[in-house]
């Protein structure tokens, strides 16, 4: 990965990234401060306030509120210091990982937020691994330094060992917990001091000339001074120093220390994204690599969100522009159906508001309202039959059967389930024999979310029950072989929402046996959505 000097300035100034973290590390707080400095909101607290306003419109969000989890991902755009930041929000709860994984296919970099007292937590590690699969550059923000935190060297060691990545401190904390006064800027030799009295105030930044500068002693409490000097010297000697190339290739992560709630370290982190973060990167397709500076507009759908406004059963497909300069009203080709599609009312998500997008460039995320034509993995182009690669669809790890408590509502239930399947919220399998549906998810909480959404959005009370099956495998191979296999295994066969054949079982042994007895068939745990 590298920044490509030949990029048109409009593309070169874009930064499209996500924040990954374990719940409670401070992602929401950090997002809010980003929006504040990006001028997208005037006052801290608005993201939550707007969230609440949204919740009153859509009862589904009630679950988010009750449980304190974020169910839906969205994208937000704002300007910062001449740059356009596109922040793609990832749902934080581990049960929604599939959605999160897909979100990470739409960004060029990620910010990893960790809690200074807790270090690398389980969810952070999982998400980090996904970033690594894609060699995404990662910037690390160690949050909550205003609380008792671990020793700085210990935190850095833990990240290096746990995640097998080099960590370069670009700031160094001065004091911890109650004693935390700010950071030493390791790259620019500056002192950044936190204002404890005003949480929204930007840190005071003082230029100094190295560790012997008398201004250091004037501004840092005496009892912290010696430790600071020792630690910074040791860090410079023992730890990797920041190397941009290595960062862009995903081998090294720069780490900032701060306190999001006190607005401390946030601006420095944003400057880091602006200065070092990658501009929009080329995207892979089955036939060739798509460079952002190519003139024709291309893009892929990585998320579909339904019922954002329950009054209109609309869906918004989130598309990452891979190349070109898009303008409103453009006619693009929907590659899967080979049909033209006039994109007349695309939406840009400016902070928490939706706004019509007049234009967008490679790297941007636009929302396209539609009635279900657009699905995850779909490509829109100016004619080229592109198939973007890399958006995974995971085999569900949990299966349950679902039925409407009122049998008269069965038909409606089918419609609701199909919609969630298209949205990517769950896998829905219709067994070849019998009635009813089997729903597959990657995390148990998703069953509850689905039940709640089906009730709220479609008015159908449903019951999920244990299924006799525990695994699902997509069956592919020569047509005749697949058909004769399906005919002799009817009790195990089902179709997914695309009509593709799936084999359901509760025994891994079964899968092994079929693979042995039917070498022409392939049983796969994933189905690429593109
Ligand atoms: P998340 O989105 O990653 O789940 O985290 P979120 O920002 O919601 O933060 C989780 C909790 O941590 C919140 O407290 C938040 O105020 C607090 N927090 C965030 N940044 C800092 C920080 O720099 N220092 C300290 N001390 N706390 C921080 P809460 O009590 O759960 O919610 P709230 O009542 O404050 O909203």
Image (cartoon, helix red, strand yellow):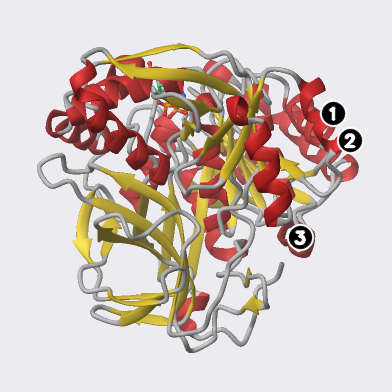
Q: Is residue 413 above or below residue 34?
A: above
* Quadrant of the rendered image containing residue 334: bottom left
Few, some or many C-alpha atoms within 10 Å of disc 3 (few <14, some 14-19, many ≥20)? some
Q: Is residue 282 above or below residue 251?
A: below
User: x, y percentage for residue 510?
Assistant: 78, 24
* Residue with the mark numbered 3: 249
Residue 516 numbered tag: 2
* Quadrant of the rendered image containing residue 140: top right
Tag 3's secondary structure? loop
Q: Is residue 263 left or right of residue 358?
A: right
Q: Residue at the spot x=63%, y=37% of the render?
A: 487
Of the image marks 2 and 3, the number of the one nearer the N terminus: 3
User: x, y percentage for residue 364?
Assistant: 42, 66
Cβ–Cβ under 8 Å for marks 2 and 1: yes
Q: Report whether the residue tagged 1 is closer than 8 Å to ligand 1.
A: no
* Quadrant of the rendered image containing residue 51: top left
The quarter of the rendering in which ligand 1 is drawn is top left
Question: Is the C terminus in the top left, top right, bottom left or bottom right quadrant?
Answer: bottom right
Q: Nearer the viewer, residue 25 or 306?
A: 306
Q: Residue at the spot x=18%, y=36% of the render?
A: 54
Q: Is residue 492 left or right of residue 401?
A: right
Q: Residue at the spot x=62%, y=47% of the render?
A: 527
Tag 1's secondary structure? helix
Residue 513 numbered tag: 1
Cβ–Cβ under 8 Å for marks 1 and 3: no
Q: Report whether the residue tagged 2 is closer than 8 Å to ligand 1.
A: no
């Amino acid at each position: 990965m590298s920044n490509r000097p030949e990029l048109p300035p409009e593309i070169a100034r874009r930064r499209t990234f996500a924040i990954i973290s374990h719940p409670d590390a401070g992602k929401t707080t950090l997002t809010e401060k980003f929006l504040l400095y990006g001028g997208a909101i005037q006052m801290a607290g608005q993201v939550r306030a707007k969230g609440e306003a949204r919740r009153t419109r859509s009862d589904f969000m009630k679950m988010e509120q009750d449980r304190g989890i974020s169910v839906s991902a969205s994208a937000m755009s704002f300007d910062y210091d001449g740059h356009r930041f596109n922040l793609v929000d990832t749902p934080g709860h581990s049960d929604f990982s599939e959605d999160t994984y897909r979100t990470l296919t739409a960004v060029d970099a990620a910010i990893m937020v960790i809690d200074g007292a807790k270090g690398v937590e389980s969810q952070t590690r999982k998400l980090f691994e996904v970033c690594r699969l894609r060699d995404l550059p990662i910037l690390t923000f160690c949050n909550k330094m205003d609380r008792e935190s671990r020793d700085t060297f210990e935190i850095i060691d833990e990240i290096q060992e746990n995640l097998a990545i080099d960590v370069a401190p670009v700031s160094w904390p001065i004091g911890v917990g109650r004693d935390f006064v700010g950071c030493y800027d390791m790259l620019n030799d500056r002192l950044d001091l936190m204002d404890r009295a005003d949480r929204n105030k930007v840190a005071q930044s003082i230029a100094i000339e190295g560790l012997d500068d008398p201004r250091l002693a004037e501004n840092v409490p005496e009892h912290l001074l010696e430790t600071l000097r020792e630690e910074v010297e040791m860090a410079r000697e023992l730890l990797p120093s920041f190397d941009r190339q290595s960062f862009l290739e995903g081998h090294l992560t720069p780490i900032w220390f701060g306190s999001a709630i006190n607005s401390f370290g946030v601006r420095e982190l944003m400057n880091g994204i602006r200065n070092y973060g990658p501009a929009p990167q080329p995207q892979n397709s089955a036939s060739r690599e798509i460079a952002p500076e190519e003139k024709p507009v291309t893009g892929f759908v990585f998320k579909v969100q339904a019922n954002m406004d329950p009054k209109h059963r609309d869906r918004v497909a989130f598309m990452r522009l891979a190349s070109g300069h898009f303008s409103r009203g453009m006619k693009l080709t929907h590659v899967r159906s080979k049909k033209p599609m006039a994109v007349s009312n695309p939406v840009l998500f400016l902070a928490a508001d939706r706004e019509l997008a007049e234009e967008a460039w490679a790297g941007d995320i636009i929302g396209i309202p539609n009635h279900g034509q657009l699905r995850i993995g779909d490509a829109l182009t100016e004619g080229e039959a592109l198939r973007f690669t890399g958006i995974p669809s995971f085999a569900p790890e949990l299966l349950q059967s679902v039925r409407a408590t009122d049998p008269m509502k069965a038909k409606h239930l089918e419609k609701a389930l199909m919609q969630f399947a298209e949205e990517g919220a769950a896998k829905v399998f219709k067994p070849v024999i019998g009635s009813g549906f089997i729903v597959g998810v990657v995390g148990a909480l998703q069953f509850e979310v689905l039940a709640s959404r089906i009730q709220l959005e479609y008015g159908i009370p449903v019951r999920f029950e244990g299924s006799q099956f525990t695994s699902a495998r997509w069956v592919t191979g020569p047509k005749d072989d697949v058909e004769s296999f399906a005919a002799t295994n009817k009790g195990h066969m089902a179709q997914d929402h695309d009509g593709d054949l799936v084999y359901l079982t509760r025994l891994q042994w079964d899968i092994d046996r079929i693979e042995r007895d039917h070498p022409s068939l392939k049983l796969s745990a994933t189905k690429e959505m593109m």
